[in-house]
Image (cartoon, helix red, strand yellow):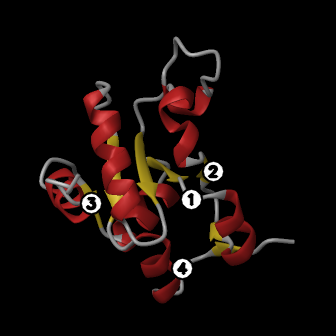
Amino acid sequence: MPLTHHVSDLVLSARSQIEQTSVQKAFRMQEQGEARLIDIRDVGELKQNGTVTGSYHAPRSMLEFWVDPHSPYHKIVFSTDRKLILFCASGMLSALANKTLMDMGMKNVMDMEGGFTEWRMQQLPIDRPT
């Protein structure tokens, strides 16, 4: 059966409905304590490439469960009014994740444009795997 909606369509639609921010603004917001950066990439990507210094790792596969306070898997880091800025490698997966969290009722989520790739290109602080 042919697809009627492609992933690029889903990402484009999500981006039209979510709040996005630049990596520079995300960096400033984190430094000022206004936001927490959430890395939703797979653990293998973190081990291979590192992550944003000070970010919290929440694998995409568990995100909805970790966010929901009624879930047995809930993580307290998500029970905050502070902005949660999600990022992945390039910003596509995190756009979809942001849209899902908004659908769940979260109003304090943002997407980091360009993801970890853009963060590295701008030579912002990275924690390397040990």
Disc 2 secondary structure class: strand
Which disc number belongs to residue 41? 1
Residue type pointed to by label 4 = Leu
- Mark 1 or mark 4: name the one nearer the start of the chain: 1
The earlier-in-sequence mark between 2 and 1 is 1
Earlier-in-chain disc, 1 versus 3: 3
The mark that comes first in sequence, 4 or 2, is 2
Q: CA distance from mark 2 to mark 1?
A: 8 Å
Q: Residues within 10 Å of mark 1 (few under 14, many from 20)?
A: many
User: Residue 57: image x %, image y %?
Assistant: 63, 50
Name the residue located 39 percent from the left edge and 58 percent from the top edge. 93
Front label number (2 vs 1)? 1
Give the SS element for disc 3. helix
Which marked residue is nearer to the observer: mark 4 or mark 2?
2
Q: Are marks 1 and 4 in contact (CB under 8 Å)?
A: no
Task: Name the foreground residue: 123 vs 68.
Answer: 68
Reading the image, the residue beneath label 3 is: 7
Q: Give percent across and percent down for residue 109.
A: 34, 42
Residue 4 rendering spot, x and y as whole percentages = 14, 53
